[in-house]
Image (cartoon, rainbow, N blue to C red):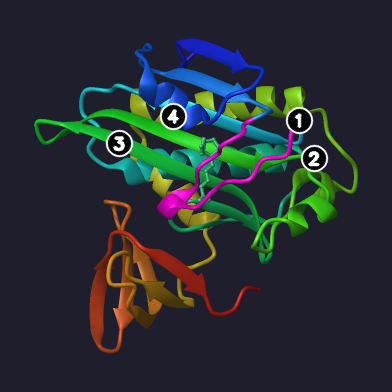
């Protein structure tokens, strides 16, 4: 087993905050089906419906966390693996950290790092997946969203889903951190990411300036290579909006 410690909580404010606030072993995994104050990226709230969503976070205290992008890629691939296990084969990864089904968001990832002396000391990867949420509940989210139950047309056993997901996370993080096969992770990530060759709008993280460009590649550092006008630009963060999803 790749993971060292497994913690299930009946309820918690945020699984990411839980791992941030105390000391745990490297590779601790914590999850709940009742997260009451979930946090999304860019200070957005992440809304959970009791017993309908999975909120799961992983703590990494590895020695040399150099590029968080691969941790996020490995996590999104594990979500895709689980979808495939559930017969859902139209899931795709929206760079850098969402999983969509067509135009609808199914899962989000929040990576948070704590730095010390110029190095990442702790990395927390938090994942929220809509599992048995129905259409009415999802209307309360300010975004087009879907769930496993909606895609399958029937609800699923949330505990079985979690087991399957943890199994896939275990296998994928073994590839990333034990056998160190980043090449494989990158190739599979590219395969499931719809954006290569597509026209996108890139919203810069700080100035919020918008640029239109074509995605040329995701490089070995996990960064997007965008062609904006005649320039090739390396995009390390910010939001990407796909112009057309097919
Ligand atoms: C996003 O799409 O903005 C990221 C959402 C991340 C939500 C997960 S749920 C588990 C973990 N705990 C949190 O408070 N947030 C993340």
What numbered label is drawn on residue 119?
none
Q: Position of residue 165 (x, y in %)?
A: 63, 30
Across and down, in percent, residue 213 comes to: 38, 81
Compare marks 4 and 1 and give the one earlier in the sequence.
4
Tell me, yes or no, if residue 167 can be seen here.
no
Please, is residue 165 above or below residue 43 in the view? Answer: above
**Tag 1: Cα neighbours inside 10 Å, few (<14), some, or many (≥20)?**
some
**Direction right: furthest residue:** 154
Residue at 28% of width from left, 23% of height from top? 62
Q: CA distance from mark 1 to mark 3?
A: 28 Å
Q: Position of residue 30 (x, y in %)?
A: 53, 21
Gap between marks 4 and 3, in whole Å? 12 Å
Q: Nearer the viewer, residue 214 or 203?
A: 203
Crowd rating for badge 4 (residues with CA inside 10 Å; few <14, some 14–19, many 20+): some
The residue indicated by pointer 4 is: 17
- x 67%, y 26%: residue: 162
Disc 3, disc 2: CB below 8 Å? no
In x, y percent, where is residue 177? 35, 27
For the residue labelled by badge 4, is the local secondary structure a helix, a strand or a loop? helix
Q: Which residue is mark 1?
A: 51
């Amino acid at each position: 087993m790749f993971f060292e410690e497994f913690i299930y909580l009946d309820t918690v404010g945020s699984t990411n905050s839980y791992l941030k606030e105390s000391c745990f072993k490297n590779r601790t995994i914590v999850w709940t089906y009742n997260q009451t104050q979930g946090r999304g990226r860019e200070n957005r709230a992440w809304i959970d419906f009791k017993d309908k969503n999975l909120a799961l976070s992983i703590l990494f205290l590895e020695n040399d966390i150099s590029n968080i992008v691969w941790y996020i890629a490995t996590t999104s691939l594990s979500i895709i693996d689980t979808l495939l296990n559930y017969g859902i084969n139209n899931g795709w990864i929206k760079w850098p950290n969402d999983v969509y089904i067509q135009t609808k968001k199914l899962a989000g990832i929040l990576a948070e790092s704590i730095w010390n002396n110029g190095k990442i000391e702790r990395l927390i990867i938090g994942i929220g997946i809509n599992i048995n949420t129905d259409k009415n509940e999802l209307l309360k989210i300010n975004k087009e969203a879907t769930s496993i139950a909606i895609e399958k047309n029937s609800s699923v056993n949330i505990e079985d889903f979690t087991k399957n997901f943890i199994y896939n996370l275990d296998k994928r993080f073994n590839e990333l951190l034990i056998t160190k096969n980043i090449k494989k992770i990158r190739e599979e990530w590219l395969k499931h990411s719809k954006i290569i060759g597509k026209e996108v709008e890139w919203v810069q993280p700080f100035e919020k300036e918008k640029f239109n460009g074509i995605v040329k590649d995701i490089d070995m550092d996990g960064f997007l290579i965008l062609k904006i006008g005649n320039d090739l630009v390396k995009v390390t963060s910010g939001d990407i909006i796909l112009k057309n999803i097919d």
